[in-house]
Amino acid sequence: MENAKRVYIIHGWDGYPEEGWFPWAKSELEKRDFVVDVPGMPHPDTPTIDDWVGKLAELVGEPDEQTYLIGHSMGCQTILRYLASLNGKKIGGAVLVAGFFELVPLESDEEKAVVKPWLTIPIDFAKVKAATRNITVILSDNDEWVPLNRNKKLFDERLAPNIIVEHGKGHFSGSSGIKELPVVLQTIERYSA
């Protein structure tokens, strides 16, 4: 597929390809002639930066401006770290759903150990911005994991993306009952127009 418009949807921690709004987004984007991949990420219950960013890099192969990335939760962190690794290559855009730089305090030591590198290993935001001009962050005003005001402020300071705050969508996960997310589709359509 020469110059096909490609979309990769990257699930979050403990996520999977058939979860929540991913099948809907895949189907809707395919109707619009995008080639869509919703991969299962390696060991989703204990995600590591190297494995997840490596998997995304492997999937994308040679990125170009017809490449679009959609992430959910930990998938957003994966995308940002992948973009920071592109060294001058560009993609068409990224949509970060329930993206975070800070989370609510986690209960177990196991969870804290998993999330610590994601929250503490720095991301080169200048390189992220060099990889695409188009970044949209979609947050919810009642996300039980991602504190809205704090993350909104951090995204603003670090990337100055387009930020959309949805009402009452929780963590945008299957367990929040979110089966469709039209704002994701509208954003990708705008970026690829």
Image (cartoon, helix red, strand yellow):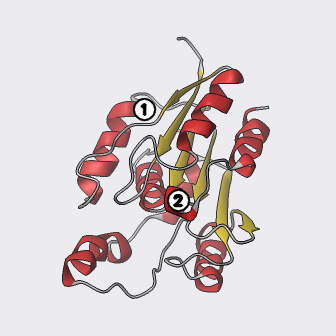
What residue is rendered at 69% in x and 22% in y? 31
On the rendered image, what quadrant is the C terminus found in?
A: top right
* Image quadrant where residue 121 sits: bottom left
Q: Position of residue 186 (x, y in %)?
A: 77, 43
Q: CA distance from mark 2 to mark 1?
A: 24 Å
The answer to whether the residues at label 2 and label 1 have Cβ atoms under 8 Å apart is: no
Q: Amino acid at mark 1?
A: Val
Q: Position of residue 13 (x, y in %)?
A: 36, 60
Q: Residue furthest top?
A: 1
Give the residue number, with chain letter if any, for mark 1.
60
Q: Position of residue 136 (x, y in %)?
A: 68, 56
| Side (left or right) of 164 relative to 138 | right
Of 105 and 163, nearer the camera is 105
- Disc 1 secondary structure class: helix
Give the residue number, with chain letter if any, for mark 2.
173
Q: Nearer the viewer, mark 2 or mark 1?
A: 2
